[in-house]
Amino acid sequence: MVVSTEPRRKQRAEHSFESSRDTIFRRFKNAPYSDSTGVSVSELEHLADVYLADHSGDPKILQKANIFRLVLERGRIYVDPLDWFAEKVDHGDVVRRLTLGVRGTDTPGSGMWLDEAATGALSIGTEWFDRAEKHGVSHQPRSGLDLGHIAPGWDKLLEKGLSGLLSDAVAARSALGDEITAEQAAFFKALDVVYNAAISFANRLSDFARNNAESDPENARQLDAIATALSNVPANPPHSFHEALQFMWLMHELIEMEGENVRSMGQFDRTLRPFYEADIESGAITRDHAKELIKFFWHKWYCGTGGASNGKNFVFGGQYADGSEITNDLTYLALDAYEELGTPDPKLSVRYLPGSEDRLYRRVADLIRNGHNSFVLMNDPPAVEALVKQGKTPEDARIYLPIGCYEPAVEGKEVACTMNVTVSFAKPFELALNDGVDPQTGVRLGVETGDAREFTSYDQLLNAYIAQLDHVLNKSRTHIAEAEGEWPNINPSPFISGSIDDCITDGTDISAGGARYNSVGFVGAGLANAADSLYAIKQTVFDGNRFSMTEMVEATRAGFEDREAMRLYLRNRVAKWGNNDGPVDQIARDVADHFCSVVHSFENGRGGKCQAALFTLTAAMGFGEKTGATPDGRKAGESLAPGVGASYGLDKGGVTGLVNSVTKLDFTETPNGSVLDVSLHPTAVAGEEGLHAFVSLIKTFFARDGYALQFNVLDADTLRDAQEHPENYASLQVRVTGWSVYFTTMTRKEQDIYIARIAHGG
Amino acid sequence: MAGSRTADAGAATSRAGASTPGLVFDIKRFAVHDGPGVRTTVFLKGCPLSCAWCHNPESIDRKPQLFYRPDRCIECLECVKVCPTGAQSVSDENRRVYFREICDISELCVDVCYSGALELAGKRMSVDEVMEAVLQDADFYNESGGGMTISGGEPLLQAEFTIDLLRASTEAGVHTSVDTCGQLQWSTLKRAVPYTSMFLYDLKGMDSENHKTNIGVPNDRIVDNLRLLSETGAPIEIRMVIVPGVNDSDQQIDDTAELLGGLQNIVGVRLLAYHSMAGSKYVALGLDNTMPKVEAPAKEQLVAIGERLEAAGLNVHLPAKM
């Protein structure tokens, strides 16, 4: 229900979001810290070094907690008077230097403790992963430890506040009594340190804002609001919608400072709904002001990235733990705010149920076709069933959050490590044709599966391929489990752990497996290239006798040099995945089923499950560059197929054929997610008829048990013009993989690949 | 009127045509502006008209044709080896050349041209083959209220095939539309009525002299057939490509409004904006590019035309992107 109430204080025009956004952006990057507020980064570094030298015998979790405290107590701080939210401390990544290294990339190089492990206890695994990375076999964070795909228990944080969690910790500790281990004692101590540090820090910011409000009446309204909010949160549950947003933003920043990358900001329209509705009901806020606050709030993420990359997911729609629908007025208000923001950050996911209202489909489809394409549309039935199949309760599965892009994890109960390893489906094929040796470099990467030139049956080829794929999966599993064993020595994380069940109850950090569900994600990339290559050889060698295995092996090794007609035959005359063609689709299904079942047979190093996914993200291009020519007619170095879809330009049957093929896969076996990239020409979705067709496309995909969709509605001519005249296209967003970016921030090569994809996709 | 449509069905139906293959030059999926919902549009070859601005020049000729796009050619010369007439040949400068005038469309060259430099416009397909393709997208039709559209060319030039295909589609429960130019014997057009859920009817202009100049025939029969079709009770959407300076005069629009305003069962009038982007197809077919050298109509002009038609009580659809 929308209550129309005048704001209690009329908002000053000069403080609208539009008039403030650019200034806030500049100051976010370069905050005017004053030395009177704390010590410089170099001083923090010095103090941290002194502390570590004095406490080298302490448990790592306590060392880290105390550096965290040091930074929050001593660092310089700042509150932007134009903003509604505060978080700034000049921390210089002093904490992350211990663990992950500096912030801002998917695979941050190395902090001190990660370095120690990579060159010590994990040296063998690290060497394997480095070699696999270099040759396009797999892609993973350093040493095979994914510390970057995580979300706290948002509901729990807002429900209890950090003080409430500290009380829980006291109770849990006393429940353990004399049985408590040294690790548990250290965990509770660390939790006490970091939560009290965060509460003191909030008070520092609050005092800063209060003092400035007095001397800056022009901006007193926001500064007062920040001062009031931060004197309450994060210690206590929020009193208002604004306080709840402030709480979440501060948590985001502090968790990232601690050394994890927060990849889901929660179920926005469920977690924030009670605060929003209470404020509307009481008249404390208007709908318009709430929308303005959401814009200020989301602008923070844009300030962090500038629209160049993104991994912070807000999810809408979907269901409560009991299965009832979440979509409500706040859902649509936030979508309005997103439209008005016009930036590719943050990114939004929308979950759909069979009964989801038409309005939710139409609103999102309309935003996408108008260029707001930072959306992933997820289909709850297979997504939830996939999690249940992995042993989660239905109630837990229903409150999954898409982590990062489209990888579900149960909110507040799961540490899913969704990007632990991405395995190429194409490289094992190249290895199967070359007896396990990379033909590009001569390096042995796989197992010996025999001279493929002498293969006499399709089954022989298939078995060789499966052996090569399984080898990579097994190696990854082994070395990931080893790395997980070292996790407590690399990145203990008490700050986020306290929000995740059952860390407090068990007195166990997430790094030591304290979460209820501990999962490891195995992502398979380039399904189309494997299926199409297998089918091409089946058709043209064993069934068709057009080419010999010797020709196939030698032509692909030589990158089809002097065999262009052969390449074109393979590319254009042999059926391809993504066109609703029975036999080749069956091969894709078989490869996917095999991959998922092998992954699901693995336990990980924290006593949890390994979970399969089918998508690519940037690996399509990365693996492609390191993979020679393939029998599907792909040239050496060309990108692999994106997502779970067809190779670029080969979905000649159009979007309906693509949907018909892809929905033959069993997405209840991809608990770690999947996505279909769909490119549509603007004319196909123009007007009311186009919107109806667009919505029908989404609904048909979902009714056929597809998993997730992401869209680009663009024409190639526009993109070519944007390459030549970037100055005219500063706001042009394109969806690259799991996220959207400004087109003009992409490299020329990325742009070219992108244009080729759009040109073929329409 | 619905009753009389059903009565006509029995009289006009001939099972003898069930095996007649059609000459199909394209099957377009996810067609969203060719009738209601998501559709598959089947394009049949051959047209009695020759509109100067035709966007599908391969649709006009009733026989298969070759698209030749030299930029795709990799000069493998396989086509030269298989060509029975010497149309695919090698020049004195050792370059591959195509003498279209002696080509008998054996299709042998197309079979060996993997680059797609040579492509066939016009493929013989049975009703079953087309229906197999159409039914693949049944889920989309059900979700969106869509179906199959038969277009061309003029599909009813292949009357037996079109009727058979419409009947098969109707029997399969798939909504049917026929996009016709109306330049036919009424007895032929009438046969499609029982199996056609909605007609898309092209009007090229109301000035018969002008029509003859640009289209090749006067418009009398087209107008007469439209009257007769509307009397059958079949729902009809009128489609008009607006070509500036050719068919957009106030007089022509007013005459259109007068004609359509007096007819029953006109469910809508769709204005399409002329564009000259099909030029490369003419080149690839070895034809003179006849497309008028005029700009696409301005949005304001389309809106103004739409308003004149709406004044006659018509439901006008402007192009979604202008």
Image: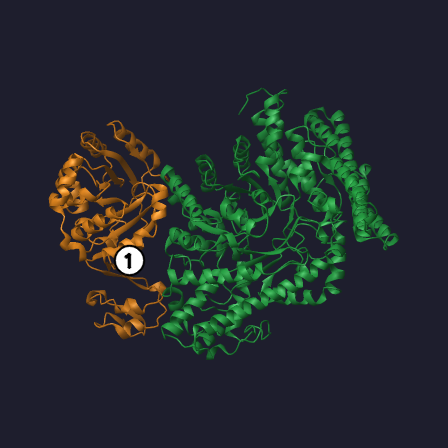
Chain colours: A green, B orange
Is residue A326 something that shows in the picture?
yes
Q: Which residue is mark 1?
A: B283
Position of A516 compared to B297: left or right? Answer: right
- What's the residue type where badge 1 is placed? Val
| Residue A116 left/right relative to B218 | right
Residue positioned 86% across, 54% down in the render: A53
Q: Nearer the viewer, residue A659 or A636?
A: A659
Neighbour tally class for label 1: few under 14, some 14-19, many 20 plus, Cα within 10 Å = some
Residue A94 position, x and y percent, is: 77, 49
Q: Residue at x 55, y 21 (%)?
A: A4
Count all numbered tags in the image, as a single digit.
Answer: 1
Q: Measuring from the top left, give residue A321's x and y in whole percent.
A: 57, 39
Q: Residue A300 versus residue A287: which sits nearer the camera?
A: A287
User: Is A665 on the left or on the right of A423, as rendered?
Assistant: left
Q: Is A123 rendered above or below residue A327?
A: below
The chain letter under disc 1 is B
Q: What residue appears at the point 65 percent right and 39 percent down from the top-left corner?
A: A154
Q: Please report the residue visible at 80 percent of the width from the left and 47 percent of the height from the top.
A: A67
**A683 on left or right of A107:** left
Instruction: Find numbered disc 1 in the image and state the secondary structure of the residue it sits on.
Output: helix
At which x and y percent is residue A628?
51, 69
From the viewer's perspective, is residue B67 above or below residue A727?
below
Q: Is residue A76 visible?
A: no
x and y, in percent, of residue B134 in the image: 30, 51
Q: Which residue is the extreme one toward the right?
A: A54
